[in-house]
Image (cartoon, rainbow, N blue to C red):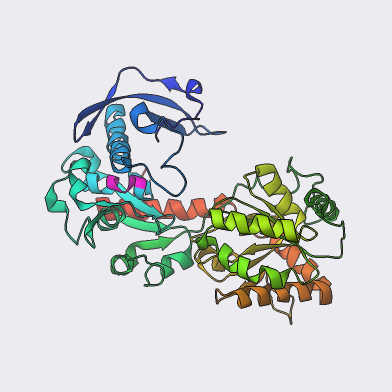
Amino acid sequence: MPLYAGMPWNDFEILDGLLTVPMWWGGARARVRTGHLPDSDVPLYCLEFNRYFDRPYLYGPPGDGYSDNLERFTFLSRGALEICKALGFIPDVIHCNDWQTALIPVYVNTVEWMQPLHGSATIYSIHNLAYQGVFDGNAVFITGLGREHYHPGELEHFGSMNLTKGALYHSTLLSTVSPTYAREIQTGAYGNGLDGVLSGRSGDLFGILNGIDTDEWNPAKDRHLPATFSVDDLAGKAACKAALQKEAGFAVRPDVPVFGVIGRLTSQKGFDVLAHALDRILSWDVQIVLLGTGDQDAERFFAWADSQRGDRFRAWLRFDNGRAHRIEAGADFFLMPSRFEPCGLNQMYSLRYGTLPVVRATGGLVDTVQNYDERTAGGTGFMFTDLHPESLANTIGWAVSTWFDRPAHIQTMRRRAMQQDNSWNRAAAAYEDLYLRAYERRRGHPFSD
């Protein structure tokens, strides 16, 4: 990965010599620093090239991207392969994530043709198809690839260069972060112009649901909470709720349902829909706490709502990890009215903390939340389909009526939610299987130790 500003540079060992990375303007000479991923023995190699990566933002200021991002991530992609060669390491599988590494599968099939790295299988994972790495078609030369690769079957897409499209063409196998999202992106509604390409490779596209860090997000041990709790002893959750109400400046009432909202204030997350439904929702006996930053118009609206309805709506418009934990623990319900959600993590945190999600039926939300059944008390949350203020309000109203009219159902769902397994153990087994599939596809025979 790049050695970004803000990383603990001095904690990494500097390898001897300089790595020469082929670029359109010549050979970029970079240092390589090495360390380990936190709490593991997994080695980490960082490309140190301050011209590209010693900057205040990873990809650019909010709402914008650096003008040389194509050059920066061409360097990363070529540099990753050059590190492998310098170390004498020929991977069985190279797993590339999102457009920043989308050129790697292209290079494995082109500049590494008939070289040792050409035998490596490549997997390209789509984390959010809204971001594809789209650049001016005249900039192909920056990638070091010839114009023969700029055509509709490879890098050209509606008159621009699309790095994700190149990866979809060249990768051995493809994956994304939930089974439902894997199906959705093959449709015009969610494919962002690449649905046809993805449909053409439907047999090579796998949806593997993300996991969560069950040590970091563990209500029985969470250091951010005023009290801990577990599925066998929920007393601490009541204490967390009272503390959250006090922190928000609300009346401390165990009888009123508290809704939590955490996320980027963007249209993807459906915050515009929440804004239009908020007045109706706040007419009920509920309390809502919101934590997030994002679109300036959204921030201004929720700040105004806070000033007008501070008795039952609080907006904290900044990032605060400790407060995020306290909201997950202290809220009774969690709102996620997303337009699209490749996987989503907050609904899985909420399940683990016994906070029932209220979600739109899309992407990973469908794969992790089971809709409430009034007859049996089945399910782990409340789900709606139409992304409309009335639908959102009606579903929140459904949750509120269940809270007041069927409290035993809430307790049953809460315990069921806390017992769900959303750990990385499940996802890791699925990725191992994917790697073995990719290896066999590339080499023509099964993997053997």
- Asked if the stretch drawn in magenta spans residue 158, the answer is no
Q: Quadrant of the N terminus?
A: top left
Residue 393 figure quarter: bottom right
Residue 369 figure quarter: bottom right
Quick check: 104 above or below 289? above
- The answer to whether one can see residue 166 in this image is yes
Q: Please name the residue shown 45% across and 42% down the image.
A: 61
Farthest residue to the bottom: give it.
375
**In the displayed structure, does residue 372 sit left or right of residue 105?**
right
**In the displayed structure, does residue 87 sit left or right of residue 27?**
right
- The answer to whether one can see residue 112 in this image is no
Dominant SS in magenta: helix
Quick check: 106 above or below 306? above
Quick check: 426 above or below 402? above
User: Residue 271 or 345: which is nearer the viewer?
Assistant: 271
Q: Please name the residue shown 37% across and 27% down the image.
A: 50
**In the displayed structure, does residue 39 sit left or right of residue 355?**
left
Q: Quadrant of the C terminus?
A: top left
User: Residue 133 or 168: which is nearer the viewer?
Assistant: 133
Magenta segment: 100-104
Quick check: 221 above or below 379? above
User: Residue 333 or 433: which is nearer the viewer?
Assistant: 333
| Residue 151 on image: x %, y % | 16, 58
Report the number of discs. 0
| Residue 180 on image: x %, y % | 48, 68
Q: Please name the residue shown 44% across and 51% down the image.
A: 432
| Residue 304 on image: x %, y % | 67, 57
